[in-house]
Amino acid sequence: MATKKTAKKTTKKAAKKTTAKAVKEAAKKMARKAGSASSAKTAPTEAEIRLAAYFLFLERRQTSFYGDACGDWLEARRRLAS
């Protein structure tokens, strides 16, 4: 029983790390495509937020956490802005 809980906890942590990493990589890739090579931070575009929210949705579905599309959108925007 304890092994199952530990494995589940480890899986959730790994999913969270990979999703956050995927969101950041996707944002960087889209920024390169857009040609924004400036060092100044700009607000994330709708496409970047949409892609990040999709990755958050996948993470939420994989780990069976409660949530909705609006929450995913807001969390994605928050993560990309920071």
Image (cartoon, rainbow, N blue to C red):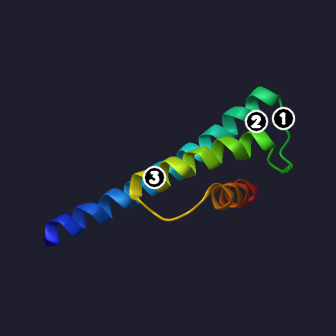
Q: Is residue 63 left or right of residue 38?
A: left
Of all residues, the one furthest to the bottom in this rendering is 2
Q: Amino acid at mark 3?
A: Arg
From the viewer's perspective, is the residue at label 2 or at label 3 nearer?
3
Q: Is residue 32 above or below residue 13?
A: above
Residue 61 shows which numbered tag? 3
Residue 31 coordinates in the image, percent (x, y):
76, 36
Q: Residues within 10 Å of mark 2 (few under 14, many from 20)?
A: some
The residue closer to the viewer here, 36 or 62, is 62
In the rendered image, residue 40, in percent from the top left (x then y), is placed at 86, 49
Question: Quick check: 13 left or right of 1?
Answer: right
The residue shown at (41%, 59%) is 64
Mark 3–mark 1 CB contact (< 8 Å): no
Callout 3 secondary element: helix
Q: Is residue 30 in view?
A: yes
Of the numbered discs 2 and 1, the one sitting upstream in the chain is 2
Q: Which residue is mark 2?
A: 31
Q: Secondary structure at mark 2?
A: helix
Task: Tell which circle, 2 or 3, labels the residue nearer the N-terminal end.
Answer: 2
Question: Residue under circle 1?
Answer: 36
- From the top left corner, tell me how far across and down residue 74 is, in percent: 71, 60
32 relative to 16, above or below = above
The structure residue drawn at horizontal position 86% and vertical position 40%, both measured from the top left corner, is 38
State how many labels appear. 3
Choose top left, top right, bottom left or bottom right for residue 11: bottom left
Task: First in sequence, mark 3 or 1: give its number.
Answer: 1
Note whether residue 17 is visible.
no
